Image: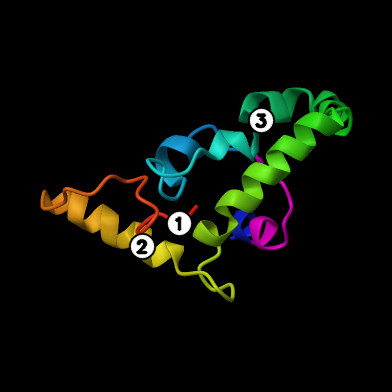
Amino acid sequence: RKFFDAVAQGCIPVVVADQWLFSFAPFPGHIDHESYAVFISEDRWMRDLKGVIRELEDMPLEELALRYRALRDVMLLLTYDSPGSHALGSVLLWEMELRCGTTTLDPRDEDIYPV
């Protein structure tokens, strides 16, 4: 829930969960989560919290700007209850068609994937 709250507020999420990308990330085949979120290993978080905080505070403005632009590009996919968000439904339909083996659509088709 906190991840989605951060995204909804336009904040770059910091994810401290080793398996998040593989087990919990929404629409991993459609969204490049590493382009906007910062991932910290659980072990590093526990061993070197001061270093992690220092690294986050020292992140170059250019990198922050790139991550923020990437976040804005996917925000409507991740915040389905935001005004104007219809993309979540599009991705769900595409996933359903893909899993049923009935789709001939390209997942990057702007009609179904408006990002």
Q: Identify the colour scheme used.
A: rainbow
Q: Residues within 10 Å of mark 1 (few under 14, many from 20)?
A: some
User: Alpha-carbon distance for marks 1 and 2?
Assistant: 8 Å
In the picture, measured across the screen, residue 90 lies left or right of residue 35, that is left
- Residue 27's place in the image compared with 16, above or below, is below
Q: Residue at x 59, y 76 (%)?
A: 83
| Above/below status of 112 relative to 21 | below
Please tell me whether residue 45 is drawn above or below residue 26 in the rendered image.
above
Residue to which mark 1 is pinned: 114
The percent coordinates of residue 46 (x first, y second) are 72, 29
In this orientation, does residue 80 appear?
yes
Q: Amino acid at mark 3?
A: Ile
Q: Tag 2: residue type?
A: Ser
Quadrant including the N terminus:
bottom right
Seen from the viewer's position, the closer of residues 42 and 36 is: 36
User: Residue 98, position in %: x, y?
Assistant: 20, 49
Q: CA distance from mark 1 to mark 3?
A: 30 Å
Residue occupied by mark 2: 90
Residue nearest the observer in this picture, 62 or 110: 110
- Report the residue at 69% width, 56% height from top: 6
Please give the range of residues in magenta: 5-15
Left/right placement of residue 6 relative to residue 115 reads: right
Residue at disc 1, secondary structure: loop
Find residue 39 and report its image quarter. Answer: top right
Earlier-in-chain disc, 1 versus 3: 3
Q: Are marks 1 and 2 in contact (CB under 8 Å)?
A: yes
Q: Residue at x 16, y 51 (%)?
A: 103
Marks 3 and 2, the one that precedes in the sequence: 3
Q: Position of residue 109 (x, y in %)?
A: 35, 49
Q: Tag 2: Cα neighbours inside 10 Å, few (<14), some, or many (≥20)?
A: some
Q: Kindly report which numbered mark, 3 or 2, lies closer to the viewer in this rendering.
A: 2
Q: Which residue is mark 3?
A: 40
